[in-house]
Structure formats: C-alpha cells, structure tokens
Amino acid sequence: MADAPAYRYTAALAGRIELEWQKRWAEEGTQHTPNPEGDLADGFQRVAARPKLYVLDMFPYPSGSGLHVGHPLGYIGTDVFSRFKTMTGHNVLHPMGFDAFGLPAEQYAVQTGQHPRVTTEDNIANMRRQMERLGLGFDWRRCIATTDVDYYRWTQWIFLQLYNAWVDPATNRARPVSEAPDGDVERLVYQDDALVNWCPALGTVLANEEVTSEGRSERGNYPVHRVPLRQWKMRITAYADRLLEDLDRLDWPEPIKAMQRNWIGRSTGARVFFPTDGAAVEVYTTRPDTLYGATFMVVAPEYGGLDDLVAPEWPAGTPARWTGGGTTPAEAVAGYQAEVSGIRDVDRLSAARDKTGVFTGSFATNPVNDEKIPIFVADYVLAGYGTGAIMAVPAHDQRDFEFAREFDLPVVGVVETPEDWQWDEAYEGPGRAVNSPLIDGLPTDEAKARITAWLEAEGRGQGAVAYKLRDWLFSRQRYWGEPIPVVYDDAGNVHAVPEDQLPVELPELDNYEPEVSDDPDDMTVPQPPLARARDWVEVTLDLGDGPRRYRRETNTMPQWAGSCWYYLRYLDPHNDRALVDPAIESYWMGDEADKQPGGVDLYVGGVEHAVLHLLYARFWHKVLYDLGHVTTPEPFQRLFNQGYVLANVFRDERGQPVPALDVVEEDGAFFYEGKPVTREQGKMGKSLKNSVTPDEMYEAYGADTLRLYEMFSGPLDTSRPWDTEAVVGVYRFLQRVWRLVVDEDSGALRVTDAPLDDESRRELHRTIEAVRDGMESLRFNVSIARLMELTTALARANQPSREGVEPLVLMLAPLAPHISEELWGRLGGTESVTRQDFPAADPEWTRQDRITIPVQVKGKLRGTVDVDAGATQADLESAARAEPKVAGYLSEGSWRAIVVPGRLVNFVPA
C-alpha cells in the first residue's frame, strides 16, 4: 500500500531480509556441521564437547515441476528441530540430497528428446534453489545425488560386498565367500528366473504398481504379460528373522512396525509331500492339523513342475466343468495360463474375484489317509508364495471353499465347529480335531504338533518356518540406473568387476529408448538399451589372469539401490578411499549411551516408504554391519512420519481434475470455464492440478511466513488442509513481533531496558517451558501458539521490555530464522542467532502458587475453587464443599468426594 509506514514488515521487506541472510549464512558457513576428522573437520573443536545429533529427511526425487508447498512440510519440521537442538547445545547434522535415478526421468527424456542427465540436473538445481530460498539450514557441502559417478561408484562397491558374501548358518551373519569352508555357498546376490510384468508395446518390464487391474499398462493401456526372465536377485530372505527381531529395538511408529512384520510374514507350519505318479508335490501349510480335510490340490499357473503334472488325456468321468473346454489337459492348461498371464498378483488374491481354474488330469495322494485327490491349476495360488502349490481344505479356508463350490468338490470338516454352523462359508478358526484319526479330540496347537511329528517320523513331511517375504528382484531393463558391476565370459560365467576398476560408468547413448514391438502380444523380450552400446558392452579386462574379452551386464540397478545407503555417504561425501571413514561413521551413527542399535537419531518421511525403502535399507545396513563396514546393526533409530498437505480438488463431469486456481465459486457452487465442477479434498500434487508453489508464497508473504504457517496449521504427524487465505494470520503475527522491536514509522528500536513486572515475567518463563516442550516433541504448533500469546502480552506495554523481547526472538529463531536474525541484530546481537543459547525457564517463575480446580457433581461441572498448589486432598474437598455454587447441589443426601490432586474434585452419591 502507498500509505504503509516506511518500516513495516511487508512481503517485499521480508524478501530482502531473507535473501540477505541466506547470502550471509552461505558466506559464513553458518549451517556447516563439522566432522571429528577429515576434510570437513574445520570447527570441530568448538563443538567437540557437545552431544551429536543426526537428523535426516527422506530425500526427494528431482521432479521437473519442482516443489509445491506440500513437499517441504517435513523438511521445515526437521529444520526447526535441528536449529532448536543446535541452540540447546548439540552438534547437529542435517544434510540433503537427491534420489535421481529411475524411470520417471527416463520416460521424460524419451518424450522430450533430452538426455535424462540434463533434465535431472536441471530439476535438482531448481529444487535446491527452492529449498535454499525457504531458509532450510542444510549443510550443502554434503549434498549428493544418486546419479553422481562418485556416489554410484560406492553403490556398485556395496553390490560387490553382497555378491561376495554368504550367510554362515553357524552365526547367522554374513561372511566373505573367501572364508567359506568350501565354495558351494548361497551368495547374497544371485541370478534366477523370475516372473515379471512384460509389456511388449512399451518394451519394458513394469512394476506391479504400473499395471492396471485389467492387466494392462498404466501408461498407454497396452497388454501386459507375466513372463519368466533371468534376473539378478538379492537374498533378503536370509535376514528375515533379524529384520523382524530388531524391529522391537527401534523407536518407530507401531503401525510402521506392523506393516514390516506383515510384509515379512513369518509363519510356522509344516512342509508336506503329496506323492503323484511322478515327483511328489510339496506344499507348505500353517494348518497341518487339517490334512484330513484336504480334498484337492491347487498349483499356480507358473508352478515350476506343472508340465510334469499335466496328464496326456482326461481321466474317465472328468466333469466338463473341470476341462475349461480343452480337448486335452495340456490344451486346457496352456489356454488357462494365457488367459490369466496379464492379471496382477494383488488382483489374483482379491476376495471379490470369482474362482477359476482347470484340472491337470492328474492326482496326488493325501499322505495321512492315502486318498487320491485331483490337482488343479488356479490363479488364486501364486508361484511366489510358499512352494507355489497348496493342499486345498475347503471346509477351513474360504478361498478353497469358494473354489470347491465352483467345481463341485468335496468339503470335509475336520475342525469342530459351533453347533449352529450352517456351512455357507468356511470355518477358519481353531478348535478340536474331528474326522482325523491320528489327532481326533486334540485342540489345534496340540494337533499341529502331533501331526507334524508323525509326518517327520513317516518321512512324509517336516516342521518348517516360512515367510511371505521374497528375495529382492534387483534387475531393470532400463538405461537410467546404476550399471551392475559384473561381466560374462564366453561361456556365460559371471565375474565380478574388481573394486579397483570401479566405477563402471553409465555410457552416453544417443538412443536410450527401450525396444518396443508393434505386436502387443509379442512375448519376445528384447535386449535392454545398454546392449546398444557395443563399445561399452564388449570390453577387455584383466581380472587377475591376464587381459581377456568379456561382455558387461546390460541390466541396471533399481532406483531403490541408491536410496539404500545415502545416509552413510552424507557423513563423509568426498572420501575417494572408502564408503565412509570408520571414525566419522562411528561418531554420527553410534549411540552415546551405548544403547544398540544406534543409527540416525531422527529420520522423517512419508508413510508410503513404510516397507520397501526401509526394509531394503535395513537389509543392506545389516550386511555392511556383519562385514565390519559400519558400527551399528540398524540404520534409523527413530522414525517419524509427517502428514500431508491436502488441498481442494475440482473434477469435471468426466471425473477429471481441473486447475484449482481457475475454478470460480458462485453462490456456494463451483465452476470451471462456465461448467459446474465438484469439490473434494486430496493430497496436493501435479496430477490433481491443485498445487501451490513455494515461489508464489515467497512473493506474497515471504519464506518465514510459509515456514510458520506450515508448522502452525497442525501437528507435524497429521495431514492438514491448505488454505492460502489463512496464511495471513501468521503473517500478521510476524508483523506484531516486528513492531515489538522496530518502530514502523522511524525504524528506531522500541525496546526498553526496564524489567518485566512479576506477572509478565511469570508468563515469559511459563512460555519458555511450554515452547521447549513443544520443540522437543515436534509439536511446533503448540510452541507457536504460546509465542503468539506471549507476543500479545508483551505488546501491552508502550515500550516492550528487552527482558521479554530477546527471549521471544530467540524462541522464534528456529521457526522463522530470517526475521529473527534481523531482529537479533537490531537488538545488538553480533553473532548469528543460530549460535545463541535457547532460553531456559527459571523454575522460580514457572512454579504455580495458586491453581484453579474444577468441581463436578456426578460428573458435571458445577464450579471451580482457587487453592494453594500444594493443597492436600482434605483441603481440596473442604474448599469444594464450601463453594456456594457447589454447596446447593450437596444440600440433600450424602455425597462422597473423589479427589484427583491438582486436577479435579468430583462428588458422587455415597
């Protein structure tokens, strides 16, 4: 406004202040965190006596659209916490980097014709600019991108550590293959045939999440087929028990732990052998007590031994319903395999799907009663779970029950059911065994143990532990990823690239598009894009026995690889001799109280990474721990999941999102380009066309206002709606803080050295206590609310007291660092506010001499009493009975007092 006072805190003034202080922080290295030794050790003596604190954000993917205001919610939270802990005497490490390999960058490059490295680096530069403009106090000297050659050299090095390691069953720990008693061990990295989602029209393997429920590609709507492909895998299953057990040692949200436990899916049961005319079919079951109720078997369409189970012709009397219209079992099975090849695993397991399948024409023998039972192929059984074959007990498994009803198969109850059970569904609960001669009358747990012992004694099965967790599929048939550091000789044998020949750099390609087929049903899997780099693929290397010709691996690593260990590289990012210096790793990752498991002190990110990223990172870290490369068995001691920023989503008559900024409200209805649209709430993002950029907010209010609003709009761990109009509230709060120090008309200092009165001093110290508590517990909204109350109290004086204003500015500093730096300097501070001590409350002024106690009668509030803070229960009851508003309710009858000291008095009938 033209008539605004010359020194008012405005968006323009905020912008100037913020840019000036960001420049000064960069020049003075204000946010630099020293290491105990190495190239980043400058200044460590100043903080050597301080406790360390490692605060980490899940690093972002460098999107072309940059940040919207929802992205930095967690980054602001960790920045506030890091600044606060620095001011309370900690040496805080708070780094940032970019998870830059992956399919999105490659897809964008294919569409635009630009090399993915160009677009990725441009995106990184833009996102870093946005972060710096927000005043996020990262130590940018430590910044890494997973696409940096100096970074992925060590990703390849870790791959080799796993490739050259095995798990010693004697210790359940990884050891180098060179220490194995013989060479025949199961390496932690190996090759295997794996079923993948192959899309010929896109020329690539797709993740499950990229395939629709109709078995088509999410991008382009092309057919997707499940085909076997030779792939690299990592033996994460060897660590399943340790990954489970160590969850109890972590300070993580319980729902996240539960998700990991469910994903690993440990169960105890038995492996049971069902003889056939050929080899026995092995199944794993958690309910061996129900074996007498197994009336048929089912194998997955991808079951490895399926060909041996398919009979040459239909047995006499085979029901037509079982044949799927095939003239022979082979024809029926092949047709069924083709029919279900494009269906996602998650949809195959859906309870809502009708059960389908075909008979193989062969039978198996139930090992407990020697009855012949038919073997079916059905898609509700997955090759990746258990053995890929199940014994079907329709009376006690709902999926088997539905299949039995569909194919008219026997249902035999072998677990005692409630008297009124109608058998319109399977009974899946425990109970005493019935119709089971070996175990009749035994409760479920005893029956399981008895039948398992019998199976083992008869050689027909054995007790076993199984997991839902599968080994990590590590290959990608794409260009934009880390090259896998192995080569093949002329005989196809695998050889690891020696460590001193790393990195294996990604070659430059003019054409990095995957090969595609015009036939959407073409099942031929072409070579990955790297296969075109002939000069790179065909290479002469000396692997210790003289120069020889080899062929490089043309698959690349998945995006998960680079994000598995980035927290370690932040510690020592410029080290060209080791992954991380042992002394530096021990300093930042160790626990000062020597409480295992140590690791990052606070890790903040979205719940969407609850399983895969966290599980893979824990796996890699444990291997590195076993091999002596790190000092802690877990990477992340404390995990905190921030919420999301939600925003209005407007959809047209097709249900498609329209740009939220262009929607007009008229009489409570919403319109886009003159047509009505519906409104709902959703996660802010580009796809929903409801993004608000930080740059818009900097321009309108300044970065400090954006920071403060995001922290004030709700607890950090909950989602909150975005309301641009509500931002003005915290903007005005900052203006009030500014006016406490600066005269808006003259720019002169307003504070006085006069002491606070007792009431104001008490308010100040109680605020300090509450703000500290809010900061420590990451409830920044609580801290901000108390700072607002204190500002209002201090503003009552014509000339605010320095005794109150200086602590206010210091408490505000972690939340709104730019305005705080400016005000601190105007108050006479000569060193950055970041270097100051956070205010500490004086117990003399936080103690409450008198307190107000609510008084209830039969649970309803009827009055209050003011008493000494140390009043006894008898004193409280006496004062409550004497309160006139309460006494009237107690005039008739006999009443007993329930007293909660310092909290409540409640009278109830005696």
Image (cartoon, grey):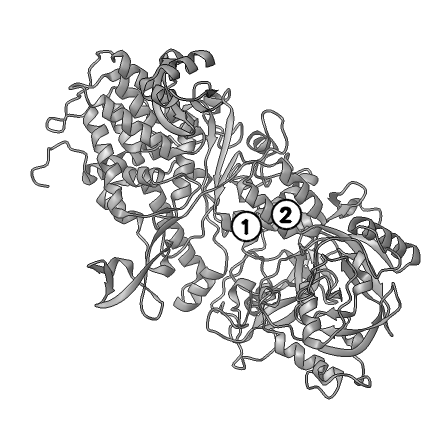
Q: Earlier in the sequence, mark 2 or mark 1?
A: 2
Q: State whether residue 743 is above or below residue 568.
A: above
Q: Residue at x 80, y 50 (%)?
A: 443
Observer-nearest of 188 and 295: 295
| Dot 2 amino acid type | Arg
**Percent position of residue 823, x then y:** 25, 26
Image coordinates for residue 549, horizontal then vertical, percent: 68, 64
* SS for callout 2: helix
Whether residue 862 is visible:
yes
Residue in the picture at 62% in, 75% down: 340
Quadrant where the N terminus sits is top left
In the image, is 786 to the left or to the right of 410?
left
Q: Is mark 1 on a helix, strand or loop?
A: helix
Question: In this figure, which residue is indicated by the disc labeled 1?
Answer: 562
Left or right of residue 258, residue 797 in this image: left
Q: Mark 2 points at which residue?
A: 261
Query: Is residue 350 placed above or below 805 in the rendered structure?
Result: below
Q: The disc labelled 1 sits on which kind of residue?
A: Gly
